[in-house]
Image (cartoon, rainbow, N blue to C red):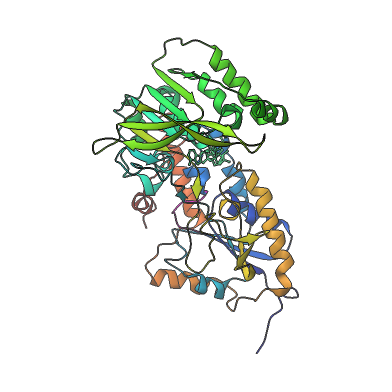
Amino acid sequence: MFIMNLAESTSPLRVAIIGSGPSGFYAAEALFKTGMSVTVDMFERLPTPFGLLRGGVAPDHQRMKSIASAYEKIAMNDGFHFFGNVCIGRDLTIEELRHYYDALIFACGTESDRKLGIPGEDLPGSHTATEFVGWYNGHPDYQSRQFDLSQKAVAIIGQGNVAIDVTRILAKSPSELMSSDITENALVALRNSNVEDIYLIGRRGAAQAAFTQLEIQEMGELDESEPVVPELELNDADRDEIAANNKARKNIEVLERFFNSSLSGKKKRVHVLFLKSPVAIEGNGRVERLVLEKNALSGEAGSQRAQGIGETETLNVGLVFRSIGYRGLPMPGVPFDPARGVFPNEGGRILDEGKPVCGMYVTGWIKRGPSGVIGTNRKDSIETVQTLIDDIPSLKPADKRDSDDLQSLLLERGVKVLTFSHWQTIDKLEREAGEKVGKPREKFTSLTDILSALHL
Ligand code: NAP
């Protein structure tokens, strides 16, 4: 039998990337930048590319969304092919993919959420931030979700930048949202919203808040809403943390300003509460109250933990958003670490019970957990691609050296594969529709609408 040696082969290295978010595109970029002859087929379960950049990054942060133009350039490489609307694990198995590719890179992100594990977490009116963010960002999975914005008081649990995004979207006026690419459906619902008091709740103190300065500062720059910081306690370890940590110092500067300013009577308020943990969500058939326990911090500066002190208080809120971090989901045929919700790996090389799995790699949030900004994924993907390149001498070459019959196989299975050129048409249509109403774009929010616009 002829055994090909990839290190000496003149045939292009064949790589499948599963997921088309930032980490997937940065992995493709890193592969092309090696200067090797390489084919990259990128698989995406949604009909459109860019993952969290399209469906997660806040619609009113358009400057961040403009990174997509860099990904479009990567997609213009001759060796790049986009397979949109193809779900790995459903339309194609990992086993099947391995016949077509020398290496697989998983860049499928963390599509689920951490749980609080408290009574009432699943009451109607208690939602994950993921659902709300997906809904206003036009993610097809979340378009049927309903959020009762007739409520006056809303609690957001967690103080990361996702919690801040949710807060800001609830706090902004309709005219502030008009320059975003928030969906029309969400814009109408938010225009009719009765929300007046938004509680942003952190289990630890101000020095440990996960948000960043620019994001918290924006709470003080909104037309119809103003920030309230009712208490700002700092212990000795907090002061050491602030001295040692720029991010904490900058956050505290903003929070002190909020703490020292008086209310000017705007329509809405964002209450930033520290040292409180939710212990129950209560209500008769739906959310009516959130029970919080007051916490104290213990431990060394830099690793302080929150501990309940047994004192509780009740916040009357009709809506709760849980924003306590994302979690990866398992994929059939890929090792999974259920404790961390990631694919176990070393430098991006997937491990099964501690041993490397030949030809399988991972990058982005499903590699390291849900942390960092978009650019963090670039460094992460460069590391993974370097690991893959180092492994080339030991990779088992794919037995099929092109993807033609993969296309036929998908067609036989009734999968309508969408190409990058399809995406470019959708992108143009969305921008044109947005222009008519003064928005950057009006998104298609379902596969059916996309297929119909493409006459497929
Ligand atoms: P995150 O930054 O990890 O924040 C999670 C928050 O949930 C923290 O405040 C955490 O508190 C809290 N939390 C976790 N478990 C909890 C529990 N059981 N009870 C109460 N609170 C709990 O996560 P994220 O907001 O989902 O953001 C994910 C990543 O995306 C972050 O790196 C973020 O910076 C990034 N992001 C950036 C932007 C931007 O740059 N504008 C926008 C959105 C997201 P502890 O600190 O005590 O654990």
In the rendered structure, which segment of residues is drawn in magenta?
Answer: 44-50
Snapshot quadrant of residue 242:
top right
Left or right: 57, with 445 as reference point? right
The one of 328 and 137 positioned closer to us in this rendering: 328
- Asked whether residue 431 is drawn in magenta, I would say no
The one of 289 and 30 positioned closer to us in this rendering: 289
Our reading of the magenta stretch's main secondary structure is loop
Q: Is residue 444 visible?
A: yes
The one of 204 and 258 positioned closer to us in this rendering: 204
Q: Position of residue 169 (x, y in %)?
A: 44, 30
Q: Position of residue 101 (x, y in %)?
A: 59, 71
Against 39, residue 297 (above or below) is above
Q: Is residue 183 visible?
A: no
Against 354, residue 379 (above or below) is above
- Asked whether residue 47 is drawn in magenta, I would say yes
Name of the residue lying farthest toward the front: 310
Left or right: 10, with 317 as reference point? right
Quarter of the image where the C terminus is located: bottom left
Snapshot quadrant of residue 18:
bottom right
The one of 63 and 111 positioned closer to us in this rendering: 111
Q: Residue at x 62, y 25 (%)?
A: 235
Left or right: 184, with 35 as reference point? left
Q: Position of residue 311 (x, y in %)?
A: 43, 29
Q: Residue at x 64, y 76 (%)?
A: 397
